[in-house]
Image: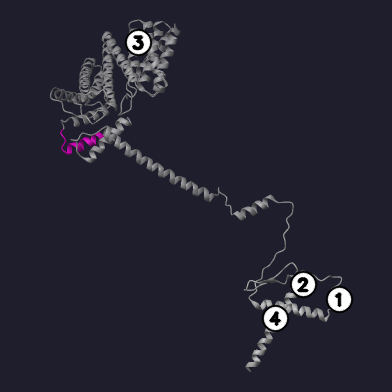
Amino acid sequence: MFQRSIFKSLQRASFACKRDLRWQNSLNQRSPSVLFFYSSDSGNTKSNASAGSKKPSASSDSKKPSTSSDNKKNVGRDDLAAENMFKGSPRFTQVFPKVTFSLRRDPRAEAAAAKRSMNIQPMLTPKNIRKMGGRALILVIYFTTVGYIIYQVFTYLYLVYTWPVAEELKGFKARNLMYLATYYDVLESQPDKALPFYERAKKLFLTKGADPKSLAIMHLELNIDRCRYELGQLEGIEERLTDMLERLQNMADQPQERYADDKVAHHREWLSSDMLIQKLVKVLGPTYFDQGNMDKAIEIYTIGLQAVKALKLSVAESFDTKDIIDYTTYDHMNLKEASLTYQLGEAFYAKHDYKTARTLFQATINYCRGHKSHITTAPRLLPDLRSFVDGWICLDSAAMVYLARMLIDEGDSSGSLSWIVAGRKLTSTDQHYNNKLCIRCESGFKTQLGRIAELQGDYQRALVRYREAYDYLYLNFMDKLEDKEADVARLEAMRGQMIDN
């Protein structure tokens, strides 16, 4: 039984082998372009391509009958193929026929094939656009936030160093409110926003036990009244500032209390109550001037000049010729003195004391010329390290407007032209176009030209000049246009009467 089963298995294997050999021979005869290679594990490769590469001739071989020798050759070839096949596992490798390309190429097809082979994706797809836009937005938000934080930090450090709060004023919150009020008051020039912070800081300082009669609290009250004056809230300012002036004058007669406020370099505390008097005068003097009380305004301005001269004396005592900061500080004191001299000249002009007013205005021009000579000799001289505002600009041209006006009032129109020409050279420069004082000076010079034309009887020309003066102020968003409107209305009325007659 066992022997019979083994015999049947061998018989089936031989039949399968012969069937595979017959299938291989028929395949090689039908598809001569397809070759199969058999490789064994030993690495020796033999090809039976010679059996399939030779095609039988259609004219001769097909007609010849097969002989016994041919059959023996085929049987030997089949036995060789079977022997090679049973040496190891066969590996079939298909050889494709050679592909021939046409001479006519399709660029679109070649571009598409290259694109598929390189896997190139289009850049400006909606998805990529959204992705790039989102990343750009994130970068903008990031750098904006970082820049804003850096700006705020450096601004705070600048305020702490440049406008230090007195050490006697305690409270972290109150001191920061002072810095915030100073930022809006000095750097941004917005007294409406600075006023509430000043008032809140004063309340907190007083609740922390600060002395109401100290220089620090009086300075804070002075800043509050100055903001109210600039906002037009004049109720009670005169009484409060007059009382403060009396207290400061009493303190000035006594041994001086040091208080670092307007010093450019705060490592030396050299200032006293004289600085607060000078600041108070710049608010109280214009208050009396606007009321028409020129005698009181002259008195207040005189007190301010005395305080500034005392400040200059204190600067001269500690003046260091090797320190550029001291030169700047002394120049700043000269600016305060020149400004008060100019305001005092305005008060004397309003009283029609032209002789004293002319002397004061010429002194103002001399101060400005001295400043320009200092700038020439000391190139690093700075106008103001705190607010970066050059108060010298157009101060001399403003004095020239009054000098020209006084000469016209006295009937000397030809003499006034020299001051008008010299003043317009200073106000017409491009770098001073946005200075309020320069704008008023230019408008004032146009008004004086109109007055000269009116004195000469050329009313049409005078009306043109008056209109130019009014439009120059109006287009630059300046206030206090009543005088200019009155000049235009007066000339238009005169022209109407002349036309009627």
Looking at the image, is 132 positioned above or below residue 461?
below
Q: Residues within 10 Å of mark 2 (few under 14, many from 20)?
A: some
Q: Residues within 10 Å of mark 3 (few under 14, many from 20)?
A: many
Give the foreground label among 2 and 1: 1
Nearer the N terminus, badge 4 or badge 1? 4
> Residue tagged by mark 1?
64
Relative to residue 115, is residue 397 drawn left or right?
A: left
Whether residue 496 can be seen here = no
Relative to residue 118, is residue 106 drawn left or right?
A: right
Q: Residue at the bottom extreme? A: 1
> Residue tagged by mark 4?
17
> Residue tagged by mark 3?
404
Relative to residue 157, is residue 246 drawn left or right?
A: left
Q: What amino acid is at disc 3? A: Ala
Q: Secondary structure at mark 3?
A: helix
Nearer the N terminus, badge 2 or badge 1? 2
Q: What amino acid is at disc 4? A: Cys
Residue 40 x/y as whole percent: 64, 74
Whole-angstrom CA distance, mark 2 to mark 1, is 17 Å
Q: Secondary structure at mark 4?
A: helix
Which residues make up the magenta segment? Answer: 197-211
> Residue tagged by mark 2?
29
Give the foreground label among 3 and 2: 2
Q: Which quadrant is home to the N terminus? A: bottom right
Looking at the image, is 241 positioned above or below residue 496?
below
Give the foreground label among 3 and 4: 4
The residue depicted at 29 percent of the width and 25 percent of the height is 324
Nearer the N terminus, badge 3 or badge 2? 2
Callouts 4 and 1 close, C-beta under 8 Å: no
